[in-house]
Image (spheres, rainbow, N blue to C red):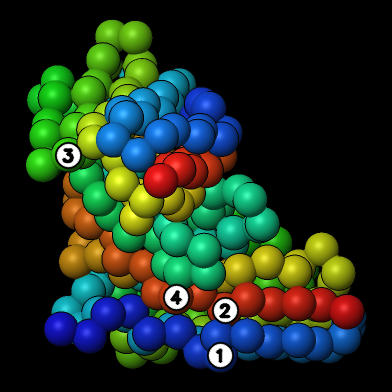
Amino acid sequence: GENVEQHPSTLSVQEGDSAVIKCTYSDSASNYFPWYKQELGKRPQLIIDIRSNVGEKKDQRIAVTLNKTAKHFSLHITETQPEDSAVYFCAVNNAGNMLTFGGGTRLMVKP
Amino acid sequence: EAGVVQSPRYKIIEKKQPVAFWCNPISGHNTLYWYLQNLGQGPELLIRYENEEAVDDSQLPKDRFSAERLKGVDSTLKIQPAELGDSAVYLCASSRDSLAGNEQFFGPGTRLTVL
């Protein structure tokens, strides 16, 4: 089955700095790569996604890059704010749009 | 538009007791997923429904877990009997269909504590 590895597991940055989270996957047939943000005690919420026919996608302060050849993709958050503090999960789809999630990254943005 | 609704939000039971979780997906969403999320980890898929049909339940521990989605709308996940290791958050998600790239919307989850 699909194997998704996510790094780092924790990330602490100063407000205004950038944060980068990386994921690797194993199934070359995967073609959809969403990123979810989960605040403590809340539901996971989609913040950005990318499909395999695109190498990069940006939405305001958030961007995702995809390297299909190397089977890795990354989340970039610029100008971080305290409200960006949460756990971020990458995911990769399998047949039937079922998602395999990474282990998560706890991002802490210090004011 | 109402989101995915789950109940109860919290459940505390003693081991060997039965427990059931309920999920109401977003209206019009044909595909429904149940995930298990252990503390500090990502969600893990248990079962996927296409309308009322369970099309992938390979990760569901069938000796004690069961699920149903009668009429292809609401779904119930049951554990009988519960074990200590079942303590986790059970998340329900739905999507319009199972075509690649359709966003999955998650419910708030049910936090189960087995004593």
Are the residues at dot 2 and dot 1 in contact (C-beta closer than 8 Å)? yes
- Tag in front: 3 or 1: 3
Q: Which is closer to the viewer, label 3 or label 2?
A: 3
In the rendered image, residue B26, in percent from the top left (x then y), is placed at 25, 79
Q: Amino acid at mark 4?
A: Pro
State the CA–CA distance, disc 3 to disc 1. Answer: 36 Å
Q: Residue at x 35, y 16 (%)?
A: A71
* Residue for point 37% across, 67% down: B106
Real-space Cα separation, disc 2 to disc 1, in angstroms: 6 Å
Q: Nearer the viewer, residue A47 or B101?
A: A47
Residue drawn where x is 50% and y is 75% of the image: B109
Q: Position of residue A97 (x, y in %)?
A: 31, 49
* Residue at 41%, 34% in the rendered image: A14
| Residue, disc 1 | B8
SS at mark 3?
loop
Kindly identify the amino acid type of the residue bearing the numbered disc 2. Thr
* Label disc, if present, on residue B108 of the rendered structure: 4
Residue type, label 1: Pro
Tell me the chain of label 3: A
Residue A61 has which mark?
Answer: 3
Is B100 left or right of B70, judged from the image as shown?
left
Q: In the rendered structure, find residue B110 and report the number of the disc placed on it.
A: 2
Q: Residues within 10 Å of mark 4 (few under 14, many from 20)?
A: many
Same chain for the residues under marks 3 and 1 in the image: no
| Residue B20 horizontal side relative to residue B107, left or right | right
Q: Nearer the viewer, mark 4 or mark 3?
A: 3
Which quadrant is the N terminus of chain B positioned in? bottom left
